[in-house]
Image (cartoon, rainbow, N blue to C red):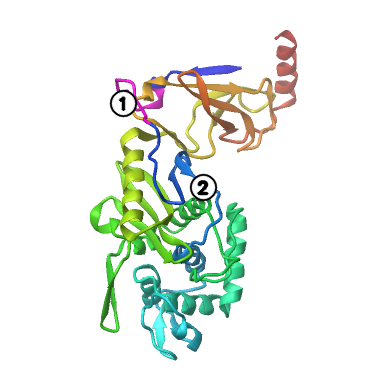
Amino acid sequence: MKIFISSLLLLFVIQTHAAIVPSSPKLDARSYYLVDFHSGKVLVSKNSHLKLAPASLTKIMASLIIFREINQGNLQLDDKVRVSEKAWRTPGSRMFIEVNKFISIDELLHGMLVQSGNDATVALAEHVAGDEATFAQLMNQAAKELGMSNSHFKNSTGLPDKDHYTTAHDLAILSRALIKEAPELYKLNAIKEYTFNGIKQQNRNKLLWRDDSVDGIKTGHTEDAGYCLVSSAVRDNMRLISVVMGADSVEERTNDNQTLLNFGYRFYKTHLLYKAQQKLTDARIWQGTQKMLPVGLGHDLYLTIPRNQYKELDASLEIQPQLMAPMQQDSVVGTAHIKLKGKTISKQPLIALQSVPEGSMFQILKDKALLMLE
């Protein structure tokens, strides 16, 4: 059974004029990727599965591990961390913590994310896992769980190692998880400067000053990795994530991310079509305590499409024939088909929004007789 839903029922304002989407920007960076946070729609991609050194972009994964520990109640922001000699001696960018001093997790997170301090990152990794090697195992377990199939981490900081690599695609997966799982802690990435021990350092993400819609995420640079930046921005409730790896300069990585973000916002729009658990229709159910079963989606359905093409969307719901009780809530009972200009762009499972127990013997016999007549 198919039920057709007019695009008017999608509850959005119809815009006029056909959208024209030009070809994607051509940038000099070795790899780049632009994706919508909510829908997962890829808008721009170049060498997105190329394994590259991530430099301090590694700290995005380190922060995810730490944020999870905080969310699970295993860490508190005011917990004190003793600075080891290894953390103190870690080369590269620094927060300038001192050996054997006790520093709060909150301060160390600021040092890691705002100042990109390798010393702060190692101190946190050791506190969470005992040593940095064990912390790297946690990072690799998280990467596997998230589906980051072309990533491997050897340390928490991104210092060069031939077996330490990731991809633009995998970093986008990671960034989406970070924002989704820890939206409040993620806000640390938007802080422009931080002072510790009387030393003020600025966030290396220059887009935080250039573009008010940008609220993260992380820069990286080594000789091997080149200049890298993962950025994210929100405009009109639409969040995009942009990844640039292997640029030739700070200015280039900044400009490339700005170009990608501007392209995405200029030519695309993300729509929330249906909310999770929203009733889309009622389906006939047989041999149960009720005749009609409310049907909908188990998750919010976002679609990213070219601007001004909303009126071209059509939705149809295909319900499985002869649904029978007992029916458990969340059971798949059909498929939602979303088309744009006649082309299917999304298929989503339809689920039962409530359970329906089996009816009385009289109801069962009655429905069996009715089904024989169909």
State the residue in front, 40 or 267: 267
The residue lying at 37 percent from left, 74 percent from top is 111
Kind of residue indicated by mark 2: Ser
Q: Is residue 359 left or right of residue 222?
A: right
Question: What range of the chain is rendered magenta?
Answer: 9-22
How many labels, in total? 2
Determine if the magenta segment contains residue 336.
no
User: The C terminus appears in which quarter of the rendering?
Assistant: top right
Q: Which label lies toward us, 1 or 2?
A: 2
Q: Which mark is residue 13?
A: 1
The residue lying at 57 percent from left, 79 percent from top is 131
Image location (x, y in percent) of residue 260: 36, 44
Q: Is residue 11 left or right of residue 60?
A: left
Q: Quadrant of residue 219?
A: bottom left
Label 1: element kind = loop
Q: Residues within 10 Å of mark 1 (few under 14, many from 20)?
A: few
Residue ID for mark 2: 48
**Residue 182 visible in rendering:** yes
Q: Residues within 10 Å of mark 2 (few under 14, many from 20)?
A: many
**Could you tell which of marks 1 and 2 lies nearer the N-terminus?**
1
How far apart, in angstroms, are the residues tagged by discs 1 and 2? 35 Å
In the image, residue 2 above or below residue 185 = above
